[in-house]
Image (cartoon, rainbow, N blue to C red):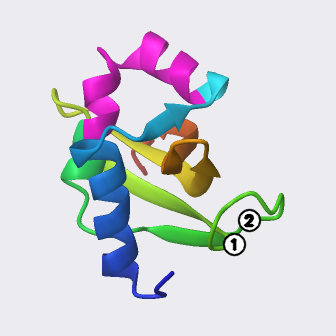
């Protein structure tokens, strides 16, 4: 996989928004249920993301490229939040796995 951040983001956008190839951890699913309207909000966050705001090594070794990605965005109604996920191999090919999602707290 390429190391270019914009190419990685483009790939994540295709997996999540164009192909619907993603899964949610229980934690990410619970965040959506408690704080957002529905799954389209997490898709909206990815679709309109400008860049990947953080890249960390995948210490569990399950991602196809060895990294997990943090992406900041907003829900359809403007709630700012971020997601962390990774690209993994599944029986259906590569998918994006959302590990977590959290509200972005305003800095004072």
Residue visible at 66% across and 70% down? 56
Residue, disc 1: 66
User: Circle 1 — which element?
Assistant: loop
Q: Could you say which quadrant of the image residue 11 lies in?
A: bottom left
Stretch of the chain drawn in magenta: 28-43
Q: Is residue 30 left or right of residue 59?
A: left
Residue visible at 22% across and 46% down? 18
Residue, disc 2: 58
The x and y percentages for residue 82 are: 44, 46
Q: Is residue 106 left or right of residue 14?
A: right
Numbered label tally: 2
Using the rendered image of the protein, determine whether residue 18 is visible from the camera's viewpoint: yes
Please say whether residue 35 is one of the residues in the magenta stretch: yes
Residue visible at 50% across and 58% down? 70
Q: Could you say which quadrant of the image residue 76 lies in?
A: top left
Using the rendered image of the protein, determine whether residue 45 is visible from the camera's viewpoint: no
Labels 1 & 2 near each other (Cβ < 8 A): yes
């Amino acid at each position: 996989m390429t190391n270019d951040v914009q190419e990685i983001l483009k790939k994540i956008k295709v997996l999540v928004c164009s192909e619907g190839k993603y899964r949610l951890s229980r934690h990410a699913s619970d965040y959506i249920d408690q704080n957002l309207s529905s799954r389209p909000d997490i898709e909206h966050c990815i679709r309109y993301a400008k860049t990947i705001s953080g890249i960390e090594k995948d210490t569990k070794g399950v991602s196809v490229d060895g990294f997990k990605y943090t992406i900041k965005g907003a829900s359809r109604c403007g709630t700012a939040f971020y997601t962390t996920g990774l690209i993994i191999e599944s029986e259906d090919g590569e998918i994006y796995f959302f590990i977590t999602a959290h509200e972005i707290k305003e800095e004072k």
